[in-house]
Amino acid sequence: MAVVSLLLLGGLWSAVEASNLAVVTCGSVVKLLNTRHNVRLHSHDVRYGSGSGQQSVTGVTSVDDSNSYWRIRGKTATVCERGTPIKCGQPIRLTHVNTGRNLHSHHFTSPLSGNQVRWHPVDHSCPVHYSEVSAFGEEGEGDYLDDWTVLCNGPYWVRDGEVRFKHSSTEVLLSVTGEQYGRPISGQKEVHGMAQPSQNNYWKAMEGIFMKPSELLKAEAHHAEL
């Protein structure tokens, strides 16, 4: 009985924490900043000329570009109710607001860095491959390769904290390289999937519309305080 009580209190304490913190929630529309390269995750109706031929995903320095907004949703074939705090370790989808396509990855090599042979920092005999990151689907519906797991410290993704996004199928980390595109998207940075963790993988929620934590969470927090 004591163990059950402790588990219950632990769950309610997490609810209190989430209600007091500026957490990132389902349904929020945000811009995501790569903190190493100072660019925002971006997409547009421009397709890759190689690889999958799907809609390209890049990093841009502009703060005001409306093509950098992404809606946070539950993983494929699930519904995450608006205002539900995102837990560390939770799989989600990021849907590009202006085109309705989901952040996506697969085993195609990235268009710029994928053409270069680089070596694993520990095992120097092992070449490192970088995966293409694209936007895929129609009107928010794609497939299981749209799922990304949020990696962060603590119980929830908080707005002022840095997070990583790990592709749920290929296990690459969403990253930005120093490579820049030419026409028709001159100056935009390449976004790709990187197998190993590095400073290139860190992201932070910036501008956007953040849904308040759900009423259920507030009710749990209120109950815990009684």
Image (cartoon, rainbow, N blue to C red):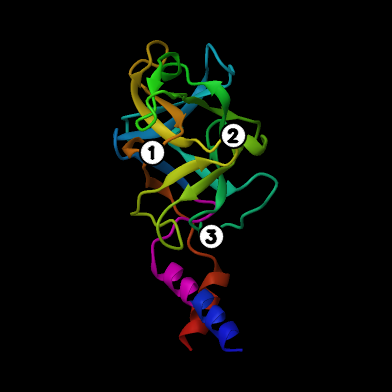
Q: Quadrant of residue 176?
A: top left
Residue that mark 1 sits on? 201
Q: Is 176 drawn above or below residue 181 in the view shown?
A: below
**Mark 2 element type:** loop
Label located before the other in sequence (2 or 1): 2
Residue 192 is left or right of residue 80, and the answer is left
Query: Front-most of 37 and 125?
Result: 125
Query: Front-most of 111 and 6?
Result: 6
Q: Amino acid at mark 1?
A: Asn
Label located before the other in sequence (1 or 3): 3
**Mark 1 element type:** helix
Is residue 64 visible in the rendered image? The answer is no
Residue pushed farthest right? 77
Q: Which residues are magenta?
A: 13-28
Is residue 21 visible in the rendered image? The answer is yes
**Mark 3 element type:** loop
Residue that mark 2 sits on? 100
Q: Residue at x 56, y 80 (%)?
A: 8
* Mark 2 vs mark 1, CA separation in Å: 24 Å
* Mark 3 vs mark 2, CA separation in Å: 20 Å
Q: Nearer the viewer, mark 2 or mark 1?
A: 1
Query: Front-most of 174 and 81?
Result: 174
Q: 10 Å neighbourhood of mark 2: few (<14), some, or many (≥20)?
A: some
Q: Residue at x 54, y 65 (%)?
A: 214
Evaluate if marks 3 and 2 touch, with contact meaning CB atoms under 8 Å apart: no
Query: Front-most of 49 and 197?
Result: 197
* Mark 1 vs mark 3, CA separation in Å: 26 Å
Evaluate if marks 1 and 3 touch, with contact meaning CB atoms under 8 Å apart: no
Q: Where in the figure is residue 30, as x and y percent of width and height? A: 44, 45
Residue that mark 3 sits on? 83
